[in-house]
Image (tube, rainbow, N blue to C red):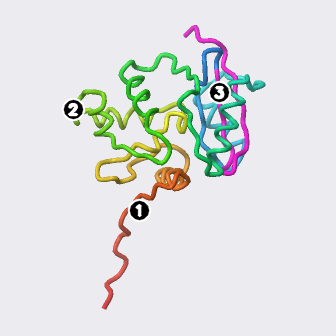
């Protein structure tokens, strides 16, 4: 593949243990929090075999500090973090660039993001696919992209849609939980 070697760093936040990986171009991967450093490292390495632990560069140190601020509920902007999306599909890169413009405490939908890119709502599914494959969740804020009607939609990170809901709540965004299944008749 000819990519530069990748390094990674595992760190603790108020939300759990996160992992970040980088090349000499920018951040290549971000792992949302899990309960243990070992679990975070395992997930990160499954997606980037051959990466080595490393001392974070000044840019990575800045990104780590921003992530820590984020998980204590401090308004954080990741839009200036340099990324290395490598050989991602060009259309996915456009989708990611549009998603990065969705700021703290704001949400959009898969369909709105497709429309912003000048493509029809039939592309909303592609937007969803791009979000599911997002290598740097949080830094590209896929948690702010909702399904039609403001429904949470899927989330491929540990904890699934509950994690997405918690992240939005940190930003002061309250989404409606799915209606509970009917348990019993009330008479």
Q: Give the percent coordinates (x, y) of residue 167.
A: 53, 50
- The reply to whether the C-beta atoms of the residues labelled 1 and 2 are less than 8 Å apart is no
Q: Earlier in the sequence, mark 2 or mark 3?
A: 3
Q: Earlier in the sequence, mark 1 or mark 2?
A: 2
Residue at coordinates 30% horizontally, 91% vertically from top-left?
187
Which image quadrant is residue 32 in?
Answer: top right
> Foreground residue, 103 or 13?
103
The image's mark for residue 177 is 1
Q: Which residue is mark 2?
A: 120
Q: Give the percent coordinates (x, y) of residue 120.
A: 21, 32
- Assign a secondary structure to mark 2: loop
Q: Which residue is mark 3?
A: 21
Horizontal relation, residue 12 to residue 99: left or right: right
Farthest residue to the top: give it.
2
Horizontal relation, residue 72 to residue 110: left or right: right
Residue at coordinates 67% horizontally, 15% vertically from top-left?
5
> Foreground residue, 10 or 143?
143
The Cα atoms of the two marked residues, 2 and 3, are separated by: 34 Å
Q: Give the percent coordinates (x, y) of residue 55.
A: 78, 25
Which image quadrant is residue 64 in?
Answer: top right
> Foreground residue, 22 or 157?
22
Please state the extent of the stretch shown in magenta in the rendering. 1-22
Secondary structure, magenta segment, majority class: strand
């Amino acid at each position: 593949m000819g990519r530069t070697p990748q390094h990674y760093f595992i760190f603790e936040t108020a939300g759990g243990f996160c992992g970040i990986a980088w090349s000499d171009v920018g951040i290549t991967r971000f792992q949302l929090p899990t309960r243990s450093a070992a679990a975070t490292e395992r997930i990160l390495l499954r997606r980037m075999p051959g990466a080595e632990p490393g001392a974070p560069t000044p840019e990575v140190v800045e990104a780590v500090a921003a992530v820590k601020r984020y998980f204590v509920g401090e308004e954080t902007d990741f839009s200036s973090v340099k990324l290395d999306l490598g050989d991602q599909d060009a259309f996915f890169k456009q989708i990611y660039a549009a998603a990065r413009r969705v700021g703290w405490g704001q949400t959009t939908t898969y369909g709105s993001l497709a429309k912003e890119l000048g493509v029809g709502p039939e592309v909303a599914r592609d937007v969803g696919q791009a979000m599911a494959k997002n290598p740097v969740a949080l830094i590209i804020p896929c948690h702010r992209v909702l399904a039609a009607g403001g429904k949470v939609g899927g989330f491929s990170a540990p904890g699934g849609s509950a994690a997405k809901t918690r992240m939005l709540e940190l930003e002061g965004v309250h989404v409606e939980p799915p209606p509970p299944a009917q348990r019993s008749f009330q008479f």
